[in-house]
């Protein structure tokens, strides 16, 4: 009996992107049945890869419910569900911070005007801008940079939500963000996401250039050290950070639906396929 894998897309973006087609062909060549379907349709397969669930932040409770129900029905995911559940909410940055990971200093707040103003005050007094983002969010949506000399932003877009507040790190705009991709804890490849001049957000929606890079062993070690602190090793992970000298400052850890930039390295899809095949043999 042939095994199956479901790569889940989403209702907002139902089609699989072209850069995942080589992975599909490799899996099929290894005898796997590959299904592509929206996560909202609750696809059934031996292993589920929610790699294109790019709208889950718009309906996080429904997504979390799907993950839990799938597990109850005996479904397996490429990454452990408890890791994905933890990774959905940016409070994970505070957890990593407490574990000693070098993270952009992060505070979790309710979207309450008085709380936000109090938390911003020390930064603004030093002339430093802050970055405010929703605690559950994707692709740089609703991310605000606020400088002391600017009018107060409209915080109503976070109504009832939790937010993460961080100091603005100028090197993110200057140096870009380096994304290191790991499969089963082994470094595969990396890209630098360089924002265009005048832009500070390193998300694809803001015109970043994607540049293949080869980080130093020291930077790879620091990024892998983030994964070593997790209770389980994920099958795939993207560790995003800003390189400042020899320092890797963690921006985000992506364990659910990151772009893996497989097209930037000729062997990347094969490495990922091998890890997924291994996952299926463990069933």
Image (spheres, rainbow, N blue to C red):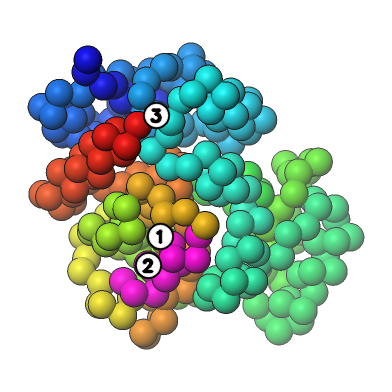
Residue 224 is inside the magenta segment: yes
> Which is nearer the eye, 39 or 153?
39
Q: Main secondary structure of the magenta part?
A: helix
Label 1 packing within 10 angstroms: few (<14), some (14-19), many (20+): many
Total marks drawn?
3
Magenta residue span: 220-230
Q: Is residue 235 left or right of residue 266?
A: right
Residue indicated by mark 3: 48
Query: How far, Cα to Cα, is label 2 from label 3?
Result: 24 Å
Residue 15 image-quadrant placement: top left
Mark 2 and mark 1 in contact? Answer it, CB < 8 Å. yes
Circle 1 residue: 239
Provide residue 275's location: percent of width, then percent of height: 25, 44
Q: Relative to residue 147, is residue 235 depicted above or below? A: above
Circle 1: element type: strand
Q: Which mark is residue 224?
A: 2
Asked if the residue under mark 3 is in contact with the one under mark 2, i.e. CB atoms within 8 Å, the reply is no
Q: Earlier in the sequence, mark 2 or mark 1?
A: 2
Q: Which of the labelled discs sits on residue 118, or is there none?
A: none
Residue at image point 43% right, 62% down? 227
Residue 174 visible in this rendered orientation of the protein: no
Marks 3 and 1, how far apart at CA: 21 Å
């Amino acid at each position: 009996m042939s095994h199956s894998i479901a790569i889940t897309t989403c209702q907002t973006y139902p089609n699989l992107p072209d850069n995942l087609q080589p992975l599909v062909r490799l899996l099929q060549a290894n005898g796997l049945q590959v299904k592509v379907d929206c996560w909202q349709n609750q696809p059934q397969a031996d292993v589920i890869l929610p790699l294109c669930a790019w709208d889950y932040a718009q309906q996080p409770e429904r997504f979390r419910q799907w993950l839990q129900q799938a597990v109850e029905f005996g479904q397996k995911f490429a990454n452990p569900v408890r890791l994905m559940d933890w990774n959905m909410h940016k409070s994970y940055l505070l957890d990593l911070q407490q574990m000693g990971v070098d993270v952009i200093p992060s505070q979790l707040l309710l979207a309450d005007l008085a709380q936000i103003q109090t938390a911003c005050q020390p930064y603004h007094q030093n002339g430093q801008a802050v970055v405010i983002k929703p605690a559950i969010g994707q692709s740089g949506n609703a991310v605000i940079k606020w400088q002391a000399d600017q009018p107060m932003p409209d915080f109503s877009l976070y109504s009832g939500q939790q937010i993460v507040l961080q100091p603005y790190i100028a090197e993110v705009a200057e140096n870009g963000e380096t994304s290191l991709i790991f499969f089963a804890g082994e470094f595969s490849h990396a890209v630098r996401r360089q924002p265009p001049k005048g832009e500070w957000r390193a998300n694809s929606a803001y015109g970043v250039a994607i540049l293949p890079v080869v980080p130093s062993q020291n930077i790879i070690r620091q990024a892998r050290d983030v994964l070593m602190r997790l209770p389980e090793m994920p099958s795939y992970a993207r560790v995003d950070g800003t390189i400042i000298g020899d320092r890797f400052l963690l921006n985000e850890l992506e364990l659910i639906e990151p772009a893996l930039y497989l097209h930037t390295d000729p062997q990347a899809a094969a490495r990922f396929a091998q890890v997924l095949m291994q996952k299926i043999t463990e069933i």
